[in-house]
Image: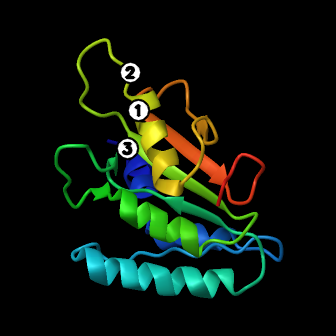
Amino acid sequence: MPDAVISHFSRSLKDIARLNSPCVQIEVFDLPFLDRDEYMQGLQASLANLISSGSPCIVFLDPDTGLEPMNKHELEHVLESELAQIWSAMRADDVLVFYQHKTDRKRGTSWIDPKRKQFEKALGLPIGAAKMARGETATDVVFFFAQKGSQNSQT
């Protein structure tokens, strides 16, 4: 692989903070995820600091694979209860964006709609309230997002 490709993908996640400007402030929460309770406590504290700034926030969650499956969850999954805790800490007009990787569903069945409904349920949103974004080349990834306090949001 060319050195330029390796250096691009081996950058520190914190490098994104270089995009800070008077209009945009980026904070990266990168506590190693080894213990759910410890991680959620740290995340809640970081989120409280960010929210106290008074500016609207976009909270982007990027777990390894997405929301917990119905039968068994691992460390790479976000629990519905964790997603609900984060959502409840956010203010009106804040936006939550969530990475979801394709799940192992039977061939020919949709994985997107069930995960979108699970995302909405965790946030207490009505069915169809969450929006979705996806690229044309990475068909195994979608991003669900919702703005708190928007007309479709109940919370």
Question: Which residue ends up furthest to the top in the rendered image?
Answer: 108
Q: Secondary structure at mark 3?
A: loop
Q: Which residue is mark 2?
A: 110
Mark closer to the observer (1, 2):
1
Location of the C terminus (image quadrant): bottom right
Taking the image as shown, residue 64 lies to the left or right of residue 95, namely left
Q: CA distance from mark 1 to mark 3?
A: 39 Å
Q: Please tell me which residue is depicted at 26% across the width and 25% down the height of the picture.
A: 105
Write down the quadrant of residue 88 in the picture. Answer: bottom right
Q: Please tell me which residue is depicted at 64% across the width and 50% down the height of the picture.
A: 146
Q: How is the image coloured?
A: rainbow
Q: Identify which amino acid the numbered label 3 is placed on.
A: Pro
Q: Earlier in the sequence, mark 1 or mark 3?
A: 3
Q: Nearer the viewer, residue 5 or 114?
A: 114
Residue 14, image x, y percentages: 50, 73
Location of the N terminus (image quadrant): top left
Location of residue 29 with respect to 128 vertically, above or below: below
Q: Are marks 1 and 2 in contact (CB under 8 Å)?
A: yes
Q: Identify which amino acid the numbered label 1 is placed on.
A: Pro
Taking the image as shown, residue 17 lies to the left or right of residue 10, namely right
Q: Secondary structure at mark 2?
A: loop
Q: Identify which amino acid the numbered label 2 is placed on.
A: Ser
Question: Residue 2: which numbered mark, if any?
Answer: 3
Location of residue 47 with respect to 112 vertically, above or below: below
Write down the quadrant of residue 35 in the picture. Answer: bottom left
Write down the quadrant of residue 56 in the picture. Answer: bottom right
Residue 5, image x, y percentages: 42, 47
Q: Please tell me which residue is depicted at 27% across the width and 74% down the height of the picture.
A: 36
Mark closer to the observer (1, 3):
1
